[in-house]
Image (spheres, rainbow, N blue to C red):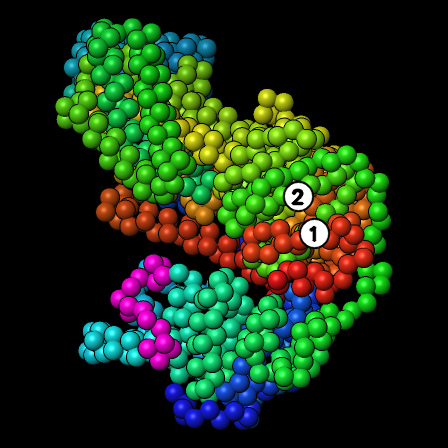
Amino acid sequence: MSVAGDRRAPLLSRLLTAYGMLGVLVLLAGFFSVATLQEQQPTGEAAARSLARQLEGRSFAGARVVIVGRGGEEDARFASALAARVRELSGTVMLTVTGDPAEVRAALESLAVRGTPRFVVATTEGAAPIVRSVLQSLPTIGGARVLTPEPYRWPTFLLPENLRNVANQIAVIAILAVGMTMVIVTGGIDLSVGSLIALAAVVTASLIGRMGGEGAGTGAMVASGVATIVLCGAIGAFSGVMITRFAVPPFIATLAVMQVASGLAYIVSEGRPVYQVPQGFVLLGRGADPLLGIPWAVLLMGALYAAAHVVMSRTVLGRYIYAVGGNAEAARLAGVRVAAVLLFVYAACGALAGLGGVVMASQLRSGAPTYGLMYELYVIAAVVVGGTSLSGGEGTIPGTLVGAFIIAVIQNGMNLTHVESYTQKVVLGLVILGAVLLDRLKQRGLRGRGRSRDGGA
Amino acid sequence: MPGGEAAAGAPLLRMEGVRKAFPGVLAVREAGLEVRAGEVHALVGENGAGKSTLIRIVTGAHQADAGTLELDGVPALFPSPQAAAGAGIAAIYQELDLVGKLSVRANLFLGRESARLGFLAAAEERRLAREALARLGVDLDPGARVDALDVAQQQLVAIARALLADARLLVMDEPTAALASAEVERLFGVIRELRARGIGVVFVSHRLDEVMAIADRVTVMRDGATLGTWPVSELTRERLVERMVGRPLAQEFPKARAAFGPEILAVRDLTGGRVRDASFAVRAGEVLGIAGLVGAGRTDLARLVFGADPLERGEVLLDGRPVSIVSPRDAIRLGICLLTEDRKGQGLVLGLSARDNFALPNLDRWSPFGWIRKGQEQSAFERFVASLRIRLSGPGQPARDLSGGNQQKLLLARWLERDSRVLIFDEPTRGIDVGAKHEIYLLINELAARGKAIVMISSELPEVLGMSDRILVMRRGRVAGEVPEAAAASQELLLRMAVG
């Protein structure tokens, strides 16, 4: 078995095809990691560990320790973790205080009045200035040593909370991009998804409002979300009917639906944001799983990508989607129900846009007709950057995920490096252009090979 | 514009020793052509004889690998159609290169607009357009939109445009294929007018009666070579056919006759698209050949049976019972398959892998609840790769990268896996090399022996004669006749029936 394999595409184009965008993502992450490498102050348990190490290293065993932190959950965790460590090192915790500067001052003053023996103050970077200024004003205990956690060098970009942030920010766009990938693989386009976000957010918030408003139960919220997703799926199917039954070009059909959906969102909400949703509604958008702290929206996104990847690569439906996009007439003559396949992808794209709208409403705890503006373009950009060809027939779901992350990483990285928002737009635009140029380059490579075998009179 | 006086006799174009190869095919082996000013020169030959390639070399669409081309006795080289047009050579192909949504006038001056200070000189153009059309004796409104005109009128617009561009040599490829007889007469009037004005016309046609009627001289091509040029006055139709065909059939076609079984497929009064009232039947084990000229409706007939195009009326019977076929999906489920003539446009999804293309109509066989069992798919595919000797670098190789013969075998494999009972082959050996051709012929024999009903459409008369049991000849959308014993028929007979 040999023949055509001998004629290979140039090295560059082969590398681009196989690993192109993933490599770009890794490069970008590396670049922003280096660019945001700086001193980081540990907080919480990490700060406690750092201080415990210092106490241990300087053989403070048996020493008396005063633990000071500011208010808040993070510092409370710091204080309790450090107290436990000090006791393990058989030291004495004389006092633990976390709170605002006044509380800290009061606690330290009480120590001074009692004429306490020598001790060490272990505190966080945030609370250290208060501690120092209080100690200066109290001569009896002014000589106490103040220990703060050692700063360490680490890229801000790679801090866990930043990575979570990136994933959470991209969740809505990435969810929509699943449906858009399928549509674009069939050679179509769906411009209505941005408006469907707005419609879905408004409809789901309004439905919850009708079913009890801020006192609505879980059942009511789930029912509203599902009803919204079904509605958006039906709207997507409507576009699909226009495209298959009446041969309206996808661009035009979905452009019209985009206007209609946006208008409906304003009509439903009477042009105002809808806020009557319970606090519990934000669980989907802002909550995180208790084990690893991964936001629910991100887990949902991951599950959708896994499911969509399986559909596209392992099922008959997926195979048909590629076949229709590659050559609709050949697919039809092979017995594929082309219209049914197209109807499915537009309905799925609509339903996923609906889901994205529900997630966004949850993240923002409200629904407004202004949500999702221009999102169709970000979504298309994510799909294209992920290597899906606008001419149809090729593209992968994991590629789209990479594309979505490339866009999110660029945006986040530019925020971290303080690039102006105007400049950010320019950069994003150029990135999209670059991705499309790569696609063209790839296409030309393929066509070049095709031509050399064509011939014939 | 050249001098009006017809200077018949001076050689306008002379080509010698022209040769042109495409990967895997030697399209033109050894060709020469001499066209005089004020002459209508016909170029005839079977499909695949190399006529199209030769005229595409004249018009700059292809470049010859070897040989010389002289214009007015001066060696010339046309690297592009634009270069040829600049030298006064115009081409009228079957697919007219007009912009349908623009007016006749806009089309006549496309690319050569007369303008003053960037504004179109509309009045000037209108006057010139009217003159050019009038010179051809054509009554057309220069303001009419081209897509509102019928094919014959569009053709005249294309000719008028060539005249306005000062063309001295006009190449016409099958100009009458899409015309009714009255329109053919009018076209001939125009061609005679061109001849009188000293323009050389190369006229490529299958319709030998028309060649005899309009041409001054005729050049015959066969197997990529020109056999010679003769004045039409010295030829009869019969002798022309002799020269076009004249090839011993030898063992090129390994036809084995199978035992016939009962009638499997029958169609009655099928009408739709170009096809009118077509009826035929095929028995198990029988190979029914369908011959006819390009555009006679053979492919349309196949597509109607297969449910690819809407049926106006008529019925399809399978095992004597009427069946409803409104889509290819229905046909495939009933055990009818179509191997299309357009492998790349309608057969394959070029970007998908060879295996995926093979599997496309067969996924239901190994995909319970829509879940593809890749192991079964792979083993089914490997079975056919081995038995049909399909050469590929791996199952994931895109169909685009396969050679023509392997692409065809791949498409065949998909229908063999389906075990279809009725196989419709449209140009099964078009554009594939001799070795692969032979393998496909053997496969047709084997399928017939296994009791399949086979319909084979082909433009190659020797192939139809050599591989069919019975032959149907189509002409202008209708079944023009039937040859009950293919073995006893001749190409001449088929040609006569096809040309009518």
Residue plotted at (66% across, 38% down): B266
Residue situated in front as seen by the camera: A300 or B341 = B341
- The residue to which callout 1 is attached is B482
- Main SS of residues in magenta: loop
- The answer to whether B373 is drawn above or below residue A430 in the figure is above
Task: Give the chain of mark 2.
Answer: B
Residue situated in front as seen by the camera: A314 or A72 = A314
Does the stretch in magenta take in A418?
no
Q: Amino acid at mark 1?
A: Glu
Q: Which residues are magenta?
A: B134-149
| Horizontal and vertical percent position of residue B317 | 64, 33
Q: Amino acid at mark 2?
A: Phe
Does the stretch in magenta take in B142?
yes
| Horizontal and vertical percent position of residue B295 | 56, 57
Q: Residues within 10 Å of mark 2 (few under 14, many from 20)?
A: some
Q: Say which label, 1 or 2, has the lower sequence index.
A: 2
Q: Are marks 1 and 2 on the same chain?
A: yes
- The answer to whether A389 is drawn above or below residue A300 in the figure is below
Q: Is residue A267 left or right of residue A178?
A: left
Q: Is residue A169 left or right of residue B237?
A: left
Q: Do the CB atoms of the residues marked 1 and 2 lie less than 8 Å apart?
A: yes
